Each structure stands twice: as C-alpha cells, then as structure tokens.
Image (cartoon, rainbow, N blue to C red):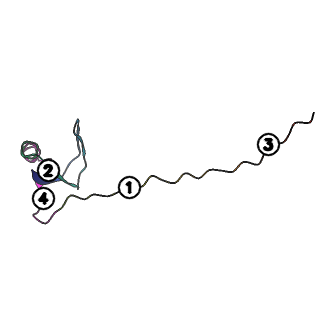
Amino acid sequence: MKTIRMITLAAGPQGVLQPGKVYQVDDTLAAALIAGRNAILAPKGASVEVAAVEPPERAVVQRPPRRQAKG
C-alpha cells in the first residue's frame, strides 16, 4: 500500500478520488496514477483524513389541528 495525494479527479468502480486529498491505494494503482501525473507520493508525515459526517437535522412544521366538519 502506498500513500498518495491526488492532483486531479479520478472516478471509477472503486470510488472517487478527489484532488488535494490523501489516499492509501495498492501499489499498482499508485504507480498508474503517478505515471499519468494524476497523483504524487504523499510526504511521510501525511495521513489519510477520516471525518464522520452526521446527517442534517430535518425540521418539521407543526400544522394546526384540523377543524371538525359541521354535521
């Protein structure tokens, strides 16, 4: 496994690799991306960023109670 920093956007069946982000990929994919100048080897201190994203809150509008039909 090699750690790379993407220069360009790459998308495929394995997912989307966004520019500027650091990823750990297998040696063959890293070699292909570096040879195509789509990525560079990341510095030794670089780490893969992991962020937990919470789903947005959904506000619900309260409706006034329904009127009873006259009968």
Residue sitting farthest toward the right: 71
Q: Label 4 vs label 2: CA separation?
A: 9 Å
Question: Image point 66% across, 50% down: which residue?
Answer: 61
Query: Which element type, helix, strand or loop, lies under badge 2?
Result: strand
Few, some or many residues within 10 Å of mark 1 (<14, 14–19, 20+): few
8 horizontally vs 59: left or right = left
Gap between marks 1 and 4 measured at Cα: 25 Å
Q: Residues within 10 Å of mark 4 (few under 14, many from 20)?
A: some
**Which range is magenta?**
32-46
Amino acid found under the numbered disc labelled 3: Arg
Marks 1 and 4 in Cβ contact (< 8 Å): no
Mark 3 vs mark 2: in front: 3
Please name which of the two marks, 3 or 4, marks the residue nearer to the observer.
Answer: 3
Residue 38 is situated, as x and y percent measured from the top left of the image, at 15, 47
Residue at 48% x, 53% y is: 56
Mark 4 residue type: Ala
The residue closer to the viewer here, 7 or 24, is 24
Q: Mark on residue 42? A: 4
